[in-house]
Amino acid sequence: MSGTTAAPPGGTALAQRSTSVPPAGREHFRTDVEGLRALAVLAVVAFHASVPGFSGGFVGVDVFFVISGFLITGLLLREAQGTGRINFAQFYARRARRIIPPAALVLVVVALVSFAVEPLLGVYNTSRAVLASGVFLANWHFIGIGTDYFGASVSESPVLHYWSLAVEEQFYLVWPLLVLVLFSVARRAPLMSSRIILLGVGLTTAASFLFSLTTTSSDPTLAYMSTLTRAWEFGIGGLVAAAAHWLSREARRDSSRRIGFLLGWAGVGAVVGSVVVLDESVPFPGTAALLPTLGTAAIIAGGILVANARGSVGAVLSVRPVRYVGRASFAWYLWHWPVLVLVEGHTGQLGWQDRSVLMLAALVLAVATLHLLEIPVGRWKQLARRAAPATALGMLGVTVTTSVALATGSSAVDRLSSTEASAPVDASNFEQVFGPDTKDTSGPVSPNPLDAPTDEPEPSGCLLDKEVGPVLSCTLGTAGGTPVVLFGDSHAHQWVPAFDKLAEDNGWEVFVYAKAGCPVHAIEPRDDDSRFSNPECVRWRAASIESIVRLRPELVVVSSLHTYLPDQEEVLEAWETSLDQLREADAPIAYLRDTPKPVEDMPTCISAAFDDWTRCSFPHDGVPEPVIQESITGRQPGVTVVDLLPYFCDGSQCVAVRNGLLLYRDDSHLTATAARSLAPALAHELEAASLVPAS
């Protein structure tokens, strides 16, 4: 007999309670799942410590996602089946009580430590990231600034790992609504209730997985950190929770118990295999994420079938020390990355042994957080009984975090905006910047380090990025003027301001063919996620060369990053392939030598070195550019080298600032101001080589 139920404050009632909708399983607390958290966090920590054999340890995050999907879906289904409603206020209050206090503590500590030890621009960037993390939008913040998770280094944010916490919280925001809808539909068809819930969760999971597949190849950063591309991993856990009632019934059979043993150990093999076999070169998540996620699902499902029977995976994971690590896993995950990044920011990159010591130090912080914060808050009866106090605690944590982030960030901005940090430099006065009479090594710089990261060439459409677009991005100068081509990747594109000036002075029409990460030289594609191996990159280069040949320009200028490959013989062969094709345009080819590549982000470095710019000087990497030697010895006919290296380096030492002009906008590219100021130098080199076409 069904009856009508009223919803409590903050809850949502279902018009009828259906006893045919299955509960999520027999246990409300799974000791084996707690132990499984230990496996997940150990994988992540060892990966970030660069411990040999843990090249795929990043899949620990995927394990966490499946666990969360299983636990949350099971909790919601039990509540809906038992009471006919889902109390959203209590649900979110529990999440706030469990997650926000330790997460806020780490964020506040990171913001304050950053303010004390990091360069001003580092403080500003960290404050922005802390602010986004404090409101659980870290993943979209890092997606927005194009952060490469696998390229993370000491220059990356100390709260980069909060992207996964943001994904999880966004999942918690939406998933209860889906479960409520499915349960509401299921109660109207009692005989098919289980199938309806499984179908709904399955379709949602499949849709997210398909989106993840397509996005992994087209936009790796979005695919890795987006909630939409990761929701299917939670859904895998949700499917196990939705099938838990059936699995519990099957557990009575001896044959099912044998299957449970096999499932559990096969799942362990899949997860451990992922940790050992996968690495950063594998496109992820994509299909590669199926191995750890399905492995985790198998471990959980096997645990339902055999519980913690002797010899099972559950028995091993339920051992007290393993469970303790699992209990501390959340705090350990929160602490390990900022400890590593903040220490290596001052020591430089450490070996895996020293990194492992740092991970143990982070574990000490995690244990302290567990016993001094997490457990006391968890035992606070007032918070457990009522949603309002727990919600207020969560809001307090968010408020404190955002306030500290705003305070430290605004202080950094004020100091960076002061006259001591920024002063006008007449970049159009070539002699003032690059002349022999000015050898300043300290003082304000231009552009200001705060503005330098956005001091990029205009128009912005001249550089194609991830999108599939037209071969020709833009033109500069005089329409119908003498045709000149600038062709290459972002290291060619950085010279657009200089060529814009030359086009204006000489009546040129400059055709810019530039695509980020796509070199001029035809490097043989690899079976990995290298940008130059992307089929779109290969097609773009071929189509660009075909367009340039049809254009018949008076001059072709080519330039590319010089560190794509270490094998110089392969680099030369790739260059010869592209240069031979470009010679069909019957135009002189200028090879513009690549600019020196700094070892760190230059605006950040200079923001802490106004008193001595030389602290940000760096050695030239010495990596040869084989086309230069080939051209000098006459083995590349029609190719002339244009070398501006002396304007960046004094001997083997290269500078970040030249007489007040900040040369770099990041750890690789010139500021638009610097590129424009070097237009006279570029013009001089072209004239000296008789490469300036007649207008």
Image (cartoon, rainbow, N blue to C red):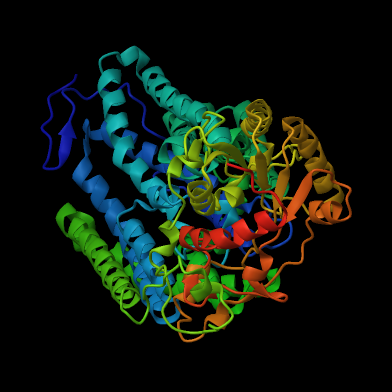
Residue nearest the observer in this picture, 545 or 343: 545
Q: Residue at x 65, y 44 (%)?
A: 268
Residue nearest the observer in this picture, 101 or 410: 410
The vertical placement of 392 against 543, above or below, is: below
In the rendering, at what x and y percent does residue 662 appear?
49, 70
Residue nearest the observer in this picture, 59 or 19: 59
Rendered-image quadrant of the C terminus: top right
Q: Residue at x 62, y 46 (%)?
A: 313
Mark yes or no: residue 115 visible: yes
Q: Is residue 222 left or right of residue 348?
A: left
The vertical placement of 112 against 527, above or below, is: below
In the rendering, at what x and y percent does residue 344 appear?
57, 74
In the rendering, at what x and y percent does residue 330 appear?
45, 60
Mark yes or no: residue 319 visible: no
The vertical placement of 59 against 187, above or below, is: below
Residue nearest the observer in this picture, 448 or 235: 448
Rendered-image quadrant of the N terminus: top left
Q: Residue furthest bottom?
A: 611
Q: Residue furthest front?
A: 694
Q: Residue at x 86, y 52 (%)?
A: 630
The vertical placement of 548 against 65, above or below, is: above
The quarter of the displayed image where residue 256 is located = top right
Q: Residue at x 37, y 18 (%)?
A: 196
Tell how many labels. Answer: 0
In the rendering, at what x and y percent does residue 517 appear?
61, 45
Q: Is residue 484 left or right of residue 187?
A: right
